Amino acid sequence: MRYTKYINNDWLYKPDFKEEYINTTFDGKGFEKVELPHTNIEIPYNCFDEKIYQFTSCYRRKLSLTNWYKNKKIFIDFEGIMIYAKVYLNGNCISEHKGGYTPFSVDITNYVNFNEENILVVMVDSTERKDIPPYGYVVDYLTYGGIYREVKLRIVDKLFIENVQVKVKDTLSNNIYTEIDVYLENTFDIGKYCEIKASIIDGGNTIDSKVNKFAIKAKEKTKVTIFMDNFKNIELWDLDNPKLYSCHIEISDNKKVKDSFETKFGFRQAIFKEDGFYLNKIKTKLIGLNRHQSYPYVGYAMPERVQKKDAEILKYDLGLNVVRTSHYPQSRHFLDRCDEIGLLVFEEIPGWQHIGNNEWKTVALNNVKDMIYRDWNRPSVILWGVRINESQDDHDFYKATNEIACKMDETRQTAGVRYLPKSELLEDVFTLNDFTHNGGKKVLMSAKKAVGNNKTPYLVTEYNGHMYPTKRFDQEERLVEHSLRHIRVINKQLWNSRISGGIGWCAFDYNTHKEFGSGDKICYHGVMDMFRIPKYAASVYASQSDHKLVMDIISLGSIGEKDESKALPLHILTNCDYVVLYKNNIEIDKYYPDKKIYKNLYHPPIVIKHIINPDIENEPVRKKDVKVLKETIKEIMSNGKEGLSLKLRIQVLWVMFRNKIKIQNMIEILSKYVAGWGTEETYYTFVGYKNDEEVIRKTIGGNVYASKLLLRADDNILVTSLSSYDATRIVVKLLDNRGNILPFINEFIEFEVSGPVKIIGPKKVGLIGGTIATWIKTTGEKGDVKIKAKCSRFNSNEINIVVK
Ligand code: GAL
């Protein structure tokens, strides 16, 4: 049977490389102990020299293997090393690998000294090598360095399973069946005639199994296909019920099990057609964002829980149904979570605008193979991106990438992201970054203009981004416009049935090269910042779904923050049915979603254009006339004086006549009751209703001041049983007396931590826009953890975490 063990601990690391480090006799001088995932250097949040991670480093680890494994095959599986690696065992160079985003395995069998200590050495070159994608030209993201994903020791029999592909066919018919391709290798000197057993498992129950015989020659690699069709009451994988099944394969020789392999998969049909995307025949508009897999301080090197959390943020906090892994295959943990929670994925090969020479292209072709080989069973993956993001046409190259994808996986469509409309299409789906919207009237180009016909399936893969970079602590109006630009595009794509969906740029701010971003090595294009803390635009997405209750008033409630001190219009991003507004606790009005302007949205925003001073009720005119005054104020505020209808003009004249009001007095009355934020203390309370029941309440404005430092952890239980260390995010917020973040406060925060965890990144940080986060990671010990934060004015609450 196979034996696997993660070897993510006990590595020794040095941020340089010398030939002597390869020798078994080298004494390890200058090396420090590290664990994987590891970044070759911790970097500051911003404003660093981007060259700091571009160097060659060395990782060393002892490996002990007993005689017991003498007649086995022994592999080391590397999940991701940035960007080039050479692997040595006991002084012998065994293998090299180009490319930082795909896994590779090294067969160390012939170099192992059994019952002795073995020295595994990895030379990691994290320079931006022109022979490896994405490099060769400028790139709008950093790639960081190090062995940033996990490593596993895998010991198998000499006849073993390399991989398994489960292809579900005729998914929605009564004749549903699976074609299971088992990739086998026989390294024995003799041929074998063996049994192979495939089982489909639902939770703990085997729902079907099948045994076949197969013959494999000496030193041969082969594929054995098993068909299974006994499927009754299969649950489909979909967005609300992402049902996963397991396929378990066992091979036996002479009744003895020699190897086994298990993979998860789902029964689902995903297809892009000319009129949109269909999941299990249900037309599903795709609403998503692009994700870079980077984090502050450690770049790409985050462990399982943190990777999974990103998928949860996208699905539950932002309410998305699709993510594009821009611009490379991402962590398997992230994708596992997408499978588990029902978040669709557009996965693509590494690259950015540039296509290199033949050597470079060979690496790109390998990337296509390795991406598909790793992820072909994932129900979440609905498209293979087989073009370099935003590159020019290259017929032969893209013919080759498409051929690889079609040959390896006929169950999924291909796409390739471009910025040139009508560029050559060798894929199944035309995917374009459409940056038409610049705040003006034009929002998206027509599918016909983008694709050149009315037939090819069409998906928008980016919008906004560099068109309107926005920091979380920018002036309110910029943040509001940032949100509105996202809303307008979603509204438009939902309306256009030729567009399968839109994937905006982007989910999280990210570190980038000097040619991009705000000059501080950050692109502020996210709807959340690098710490995954939301900007207003995050609520645009969140409010379109019903995963959680959303009612975000996207204003600080302070007229001085607004251009020309104009308090209105005021936008509320919400999935409530309506909102009732109170001024200083006096009810003003009920406001409904703006279905006129945003008619295609699931939950249009509420736009408050008029707030009428409540004491208008005490005006010494007849009740009926108060109504006319209110109507008139609303109309003037929404459409200007010129927009007053004839009917209202006549009514106003009547009011004046009946109450003996002169024109000048009438103007005074009207302006007296147009409420802005007021001169006296004015605060506004918004109460959200669903099905006529109050569900949420928020207050803004008035005399606000710093009142509390709030600390929260994403998780209260961490474990030592994962394949590597565990980690979670800690968020600290400086809140005002109404419970809102104060985006313009600058305070130094110091974290105090006790127990078996370490802080990732600095212990002292400045608040960024009133809040910041950090991550803590386990040290391998179990026990109780206590965390507190302090600033000059407040101590936060204490949070307790247990490491089990
Ligand atoms: C696109 C590119 C993205 C990002 C974005 C910013 O052209 O594909 O990676 O740079 O622009 O808007």
Image (cartoon, rainbow, N blue to C red):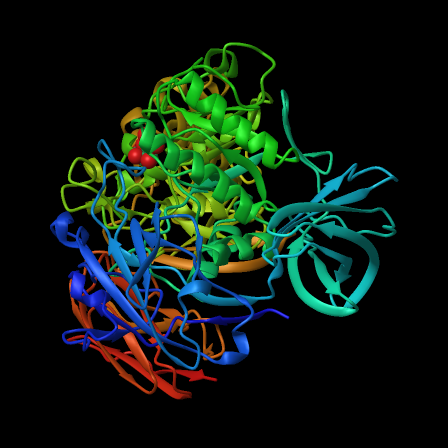
Question: Which residue is more in the foreground, 686 or 678?
Answer: 686
Q: Is residue 199 left or right of residue 54?
A: right
Residue at the far bottom in the pictured view: 783
Q: Position of residue 71 (x, y in %)?
A: 56, 70
Q: Position of residue 488 (x, y in %)?
A: 44, 30
Q: Position of residue 561 (x, y in %)?
A: 21, 46
Residue at 58% over, 22% down? 457
Against 74, residue 329 (above or below) is above
Screen quadrant of the N terminus: bottom right
Q: Position of residue 222 (x, y in %)?
A: 65, 46
Ligand number 1: quarter of image: top left
Residue 680: which quarter of the image? bottom left
Residue 674: which quarter of the image? top left
Question: Which residue is more in the foreground, 740 or 496?
Answer: 496
Number of numbered labels in the structure image: 0
Question: Which residue is more in the foreground, 780 or 88?
Answer: 88
Residue 637 appears in the picture as rendered? yes
Residue at 29% over, 28% down? 356
Q: Is residue 101 left or right of residue 323?
A: left
